[in-house]
Image: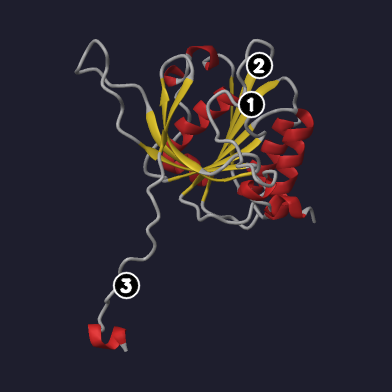
Amino acid sequence: MDLSAFTTAGELAPLGKQAPRWRPGLAGARHSEVFAGGREAGGAAAALALALDEAAGRLEQRSHVLWVQDAAALRLGGRPYRSGLPEPLRHRLIHVAARTPEDLLFALEEGVRCRDLAFVIGELAGNPRALDFTASRRLSLAAEKHGVPLVLVRLDAARDLSSARMRWQVRSAPSPAPQWNAFAPGRPAWHAELFRARSHAPGEWILRDDGHVLAADRIAAAPDHGDLAFAVGDRSLAAIAG
């Protein structure tokens, strides 16, 4: 087993140097995961924005994109709405409805092996046994070997063992106010936490789709003052002190 998959971003940084912060347009990872709730479409939308950012410059050379959903994910969010996709993707989308997680993983691996695809998006619900570390490792190796980015959306899933190079926790965020019409819906925005990355330091961002490129505002981490108080719970203060 390749133990490098368990290495944290901080451990990969040279001694005395901090791992660089991720930013849009910076080389990301061929295999990423986005964890999100199944009651909103924020996970799929953020995955699409991240995939477009990773595949920038490839859409002119590659003809199609692949979107695969298993049956549980399809029930939660429905199929991708073509008219709601970015205009360059509306006639390039190949959608696959997989019956089982095993079928989804097979379709994803076959997709990243196809060099004619600009990128691949998958949507998988829960923590199926089929998506173990070995299956995740196969996806990472295939995506890196063939150069096709893969973003796997994990709906209502717990953070488990994975070889994905970047792992995000995403939820919808308030849209910025429209510039011209206060009553119009704003651009999509997401609160995104990068909690594991192979070559970047963890952090939190507000991601925004400005209609052309992915923009990001980094959220500064709160200072750590340690544990200033203990939880009292059902015990008395005397019992805690004793």
Q: Position of residue 21 (x, y in %)?
A: 55, 35
Quadrant (top left, top right, bottom left, bottom right) of the N terminus: bottom right
Q: Which mark is residue 119?
A: 1
Q: Residue at x 59, y 16 (%)?
A: 92
Between label 2 and label 3, give the one nearer the viewer. 3
Q: Which residue is mark 2?
A: 58
Disc 2 or 1, which lies upstream in sequence? 2
Q: Nearer the viewer, residue 10 or 181?
A: 10
Q: Nearer the viewer, residue 232 or 242?
A: 242
Q: Secondary structure at mark 1?
A: strand
Question: Which residue sits at x=30%, y=69%?
Answer: 229
Could you say where residue 95 lies in the image, as x and y percent from the top left?
58, 28
Say which amino acid is labelled 2: Arg
Instruction: Report if the CB atoms under discs 1 and 3 are less than 8 Å apart.
Output: no
Query: Pointer 2 and pointer 1: residues touching (CB < 8 Å)?
Result: yes
Measuring from the top left, give residue 169's x and y in whole percent: 47, 44
Residue type for callout 1: Phe
State the CA–CA distance, disc 1 to disc 3.
Answer: 48 Å
Q: Which residue is mark 3?
A: 230
Crowding at mark 1 (Cα within 10 Å: few <14, some 14-19, many 20+) = many
Q: Nearer the viewer, mark 2 or mark 1?
A: 2
- Label 1 vs 3, first from the N-terminus: 1
In the picture as drawn, the residue positioned furthest to the left comes out as 183
In front: label 1 or label 3: 3
**Above or below: residue 134 compared with residue 186:** below
Query: Helix, strand, or loop for circle 3?
Result: loop
Residue at 45% of width from left, 42% of height from top? 75
